[in-house]
Amino acid sequence: MTKVDKKKRGENYAIKIENVSKSFKLFYDKHYTLKERLVFWKNKKCEMKEVLREISLNIKKGESVALVGINGSGKSTLLKLMTKIIYPTSGTISIDGKLTSLLELGAGFHPDFTGRENIYFNASIFGLTAAEIDSRINEIIEFSELGNLIDSPVRTYSSGQYMRLAFSVAINVDAEILLIDEILAVGDQHFQEKCFQKLEELKKSDKTIVIVSHSLGSISQFCDRAVWINNGRIAMDGTIHEVIEKYLEVCG
Amino acid sequence: MKELLTNLYNYRQLLKSNVKKEIRGKYKGSFLGVLWSFVNPLLTALVYAIVFPIILRSAEPNYVTFIVIGILPWTYFTTVIMQGTTTILMNAAIIKKVYFPREILPISINVSGVINFLISCLIIFIFLIFSGIGFSWYLGFLPLVIITQFVLQQGIIFITSAINVYVRDAEYIISFIINMLFYATPILYSASMFEHSALNWIIKLNPMATIMNCYRDILFYQSMPALLELIIVLLVSCVLCYIGFKIFKKLERNFAEEV
């Protein structure tokens, strides 16, 4: 959508999802090799499974939205569609603004390189340039609280330290839209609190945040709006307290 | 194509760090480190240089240099094609989780390959000096040959890397083809030996043969390379690269679901 269009219609959406459906091919026995494909070319046992059905959802700039729902309801698929990792079977998704997904922490980490080098690798996956990384590397290291460990290879880190480094990179990428999937359970109590503080800060600076989480307590403090996804459809969309109340009533 | 260039520009740091990881990460922890990328082809060249004069009886003078000039570009070719073909599968973990322009992966394989090759050109130069062959002004054509090989490889791995996600056999088929191609490319022998053979058309059709002949002409024989043939190969490679990119983009949409 062009800028002119938006102004004309007076909209200010960060994420616009229209009639999106997503189906996955489900194979009973997937044939990857040529031999198998030739031998079994007739009995292709596959079934289309519809994970999301005609989802329409608009998220305004500066909103913080929680996606709730039971396992396998399609929340993560929806997040993946927003990041363009996968594409919808039908419908359209338009994104306005720089988007970062915290679906996977430490993507692209190389165990033999130091924490500092890995900050560069990891941040570059999010599309940052060397100068941009240089300007915030101190902030990242400070946030991770790794101190001198930053110059040791990441294979020597404990899993908690690894996650802390990864989270510090992701949170400092400076995107306008942040998608977060179940990763807030990072590190110890102290670090978790720090993460929420940082998210709170980002929220105040008018970033759009979409969170998938099962820790209803913390998201109810943080988000304004919640969308409950059940069986690939939007079951309810409203303020966080309304939705969580209803969700706990039905699924709790 | 415009999309490719803007993506490349926006994600230039990713390309850079990927290339760095490709070059340094591979040998990290080994004693000789990056040196292995040069020791390996050198040892291969040495083996051929010992064995072939015995089999062939009459070998070219300076046969070791002759072989080294053939083996190093060939190693560059096979490494890029093989690593390029598997690169998408190798990076499955990131592809499933993060969005970034996927073409960065095959491109960084090719770029790290060409950097390795440029360094290994030093070895060729050392051989040229010590064998007394020396250098000529034709060296000025060398960049054009390297660019041609680069574009050709890029076109091939755009296609093979994407196909290998859907049909895992591609990797093995390609490794077989490369093995065959080794004998259809004038690496151990010079192209002139096949001039009157019925099999000459294979060499004529093989783009790597044209490229290899140019390396030989420029470096070993110190004569004018067959420019017209080289430029035809370059043009064909550009077309292949364009088509390859289109195919890659088409198949890319389902990478995250298939890997």
Image (tube, coloured by chain):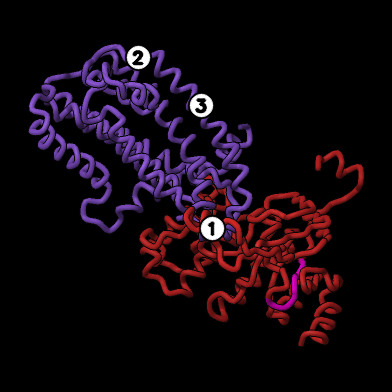
Chain colours: A red, B purple
Q: Is residue A193 within the magenta segment?
A: no
What residue sits right under mark 2 in the picture?
A: B226
Side of A251 where A76 appears, left or right: left
Bounds of the magenta segment: A65-71
Q: Quadrant of the N terminus of chain A?
A: top right
Query: Which label's residue is closer to the chain start, 3 or 2?
Result: 2
- Reading the chain from its start, which is encountered first: label 3 or label 1? 3
Provide residue A62's location: percent of width, then percent of height. Answer: 78, 59
Circle 3 sits on which residue? B238
Residue at image point 52% right, 44% down: B104
Residue B204 located left or right of residue B53: right
- SS for callout 2: loop
Q: Quadrant of residue B199?
A: top left
Mark 2 Cα-neighbour bin, 10 Å: few <14, some 14–19, many ≥20: some
Amino acid at the residue labelled 3: Cys
Name the quadrant containing residue B35. top left
Do the residues at pointers 1 and 2 share their chain? yes
Q: Residue at x 53, y 46 (%)?
A: B162
User: x, y (%) of residue A82?
Assistant: 71, 57
Give the structural element (helix, strand or loop) at label 3. Answer: helix
Amino acid at the residue labelled 1: Val
- Which amino acid is tagged 2? Ala
Dot 1: chain letter? B
Q: Which residue is mark 1?
A: B259
Q: Is residue A201 above or below residue A87?
A: below
Image coords of residue B213 (percent x, y) = 30, 22
